[in-house]
Amino acid sequence: MTTKLTISLVQMDCQLGEPEANFAAATQSIAEAARRGSDLVLLPELWSTAYALDAAPALASPLATGPSDGGWFGRMAALAAAHGLFVGGSLLEARRGRYYNCFALYGPDGALHGAYRKVHLFRLMDEEKFLASGEETVMVDMPWGKTGLAICYDLRFPELLRGYALAGARLMLLPAEWPHPRREHWRTLLRARAIENQCYVAACNRVGVTGNTAFFGASAVIDPWGATLVEAGEVETLLTVTVDLARVDDARRRIPVFEDRRTDLY
């Protein structure tokens, strides 16, 4: 198992209901991430459509297992295959007559490695009016170790990420559309989830304005000790950083939080 991983975060201004424009922008960023030697590229939540939830019947597509399945997910898989790296982010999924906020992770061969449907729908942005919630957590075995998948509002639920950590996760991936005025909540919670679970957290937020909602970016990668390795401002950018997953084992060895839990009491 490799311990070194180069991650790129595509912090972009997602255009409302404009998947072709968003795919074009993401394609350029993924190509640049490949030139930088990235192993993994993370895109924001609903990066192809933004929060055009009322248009889900027209914009959503079925989850694809690879490029040949077509649809928006198939095109995302094709981007991963074309550049020979892992690509993750959430799109609107059509499934059995319902619509989901689905985080798909595709590999260098274009194959689907994991798909997580958001379990905590954010009522302040009307998700529950248009989307169904997922019914399972998803942790995937990756070349660098077990990786937990979450989306945006999930960050406020420590039990979800703690469950991943207890099951051996070394990295948490979280695409988001997290707006003002809750920037400090975002920054604090990212560090808290990394520190309490002694793992890496990579989170990709969007920027720009949709309607009356402004998104501040601040995409970041946090290490197991809570150090911010890289953090964006409030403009479109591509962040790239190399992490050493061996630091997870080091943190857990030095402060044996998981061994010291009192499961007989709580």
Image (tube, helix red, strand yellow):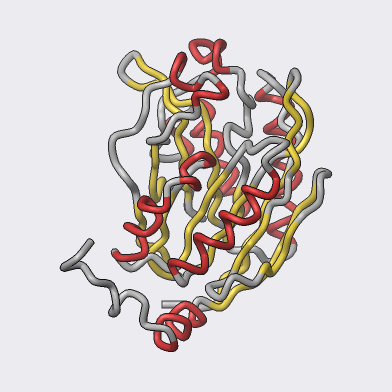
Residue 1 image point, x, y percent: 41, 77
Residue at image x 65%, y 24%? Answer: 19
Task: Decide if residue 211 is in sight here.
Answer: yes
Q: Is residue 255 left or right of residue 173?
A: left
Residue 177 image point, x, y percent: 63, 36
Q: Is residue 71 above or below residue 149?
A: above
Query: How many labels were placed on the picture?
Result: 0
Task: Decide if residue 84 is in sight here.
Answer: no
Q: Residue furthest bottom?
A: 254
The C terminus sits in image quarter:
bottom left
Q: Is residue 58 above or below residue 51?
A: above
Q: Residue furthest left?
A: 264
Q: Is residue 159 left or right of residue 3?
A: left
Q: Is residue 119 left or right of residue 237?
A: left
Residue at image x 39%, y 50%? Answer: 113
Residue at image x 66%, y 44%? Answer: 205
Q: Is residue 61 above or below residue 235?
A: above
Q: Residue furthest front?
A: 265
Q: Which one is in front, 248 or 79?
A: 248
Residue at image x 28%, y 79%? Answer: 259
